[in-house]
Amino acid sequence: MNYTRLSEKKKVEIDILLKQGLSMRKVANILKISHSTISRYKARKIIGRKDKIHAKYEVFIKYLYDHYDRRNKSIAVCVHLFKKKYQYAPSVSVKQVYNWINNGKIEIKREGTCYKKRRKQSLTNGMMRHTLWNLQNKTILPISLRPKYIEKRDELGHLEIDSIVGKRTEYQLIICIVDRCTRRVWLIKAEYKQEYYINKLIYDYIIKNNITVKSITIDNGLEFNVLGITAKKLGVKLYKCDPYCSFQRGTNERMNAIVRRYIPKGYSLKMIPQRYLDDISFNINSMPRKMFDFKSSFDIEMKR
């Protein structure tokens, strides 16, 4: 059989097509050559690069082989000591050494290094599992998709949730939960704004107080970033308002104004206990309201 060497043009074409992510067989079909030719060309190229590395950094690589010990001399230590001892010899960074190890260009194996290679976490593992579930089951939706019957306020359990802040220099805040139908309010003291902490706080409070939940509407506050976990556990939909559209949570905004009668804006929340917030909630829920023909939220809830 007659064999022909790859021309420089063919080599460039192979490199370009391989960089585009095509397989060796696909590249072979496009260029009308054997896929084994491409395989051998690729292997020779890697070996050639390895030889160049060993020629240029011969002293550096020999030092690594002689001094590296995963028990007491890491790659970083060896690189530091080499640069200190051989100031004029060619050397590379610690990251480049690890790139050589990962690509098999030097004899040190990844398994023999001080640190294990981190595995990429799948989206379906751990705390990210609920995100995939939310996407598949449409748990978190924009407020434009909220059903019209919720607007009528004829049914218990459609909640709006917002936060009330105190002094700007403090972490404490109040979580305000309001039922759209009865305007009944629940206030929860939170020590800081961490989203997973807030999510657990709200879920535990709802379960403990046996609050009826059929939907939840929230704003775009960072503290509610993972409230979809609570929605998932309760089996309800969570609706997010549009940015800078507080009127879409009018019930919450009005209730916040009433709570501010007891806790003025800028007032420190640090020393306010949960018991005091429960007293405020009871007073507001017992308050006669003109919209209910001067009945309280408790009265309306009993009729429902």
Image: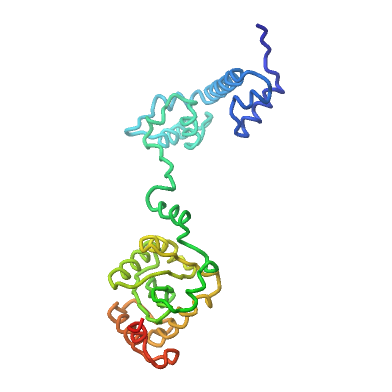
Q: Residue at x 52, y 23 (%)?
A: 54
Picture coordinates of residue 13, whole percent (x, y): 68, 27
Residue located farthest toward the right when viewing the structure as drawn: 9
Q: Give the quarter of the image for residue 71.
A: top left
Picture coordinates of residue 185, whole percent (x, y): 37, 80
Q: Residue at x 52, y 26 (%)?
A: 57
Colouring? rainbow
Q: Give the quarter of the image for residue 43.
A: top right
Picture coordinates of residue 85, whole percent (x, y): 45, 31
Compare residues 300 and 96 and report the one nearer the observer.
Answer: 300
Total labels: the figure holds 0
Q: Residue at x 68, y 12 (%)?
A: 4
Q: Quadrant of the N terminus?
A: top right
Picture coordinates of residue 230, whole percent (x, y): 38, 63
Q: Quadrant of the C terminus?
A: bottom left
The answer to whether residue 112 is above or below residue 146 is: above
Q: Decide if residue 244 is on the left or right side of residue 7.
A: left
Q: Decide if residue 110 is on the left or right side of residue 4.
A: left
Compare residues 114 and 197 and report the one nearer the observer.
Answer: 197
Compare residues 190 and 137 and report the one nearer the observer.
Answer: 137
Q: Decide if residue 103 is on the left or right side of residue 188.
A: right
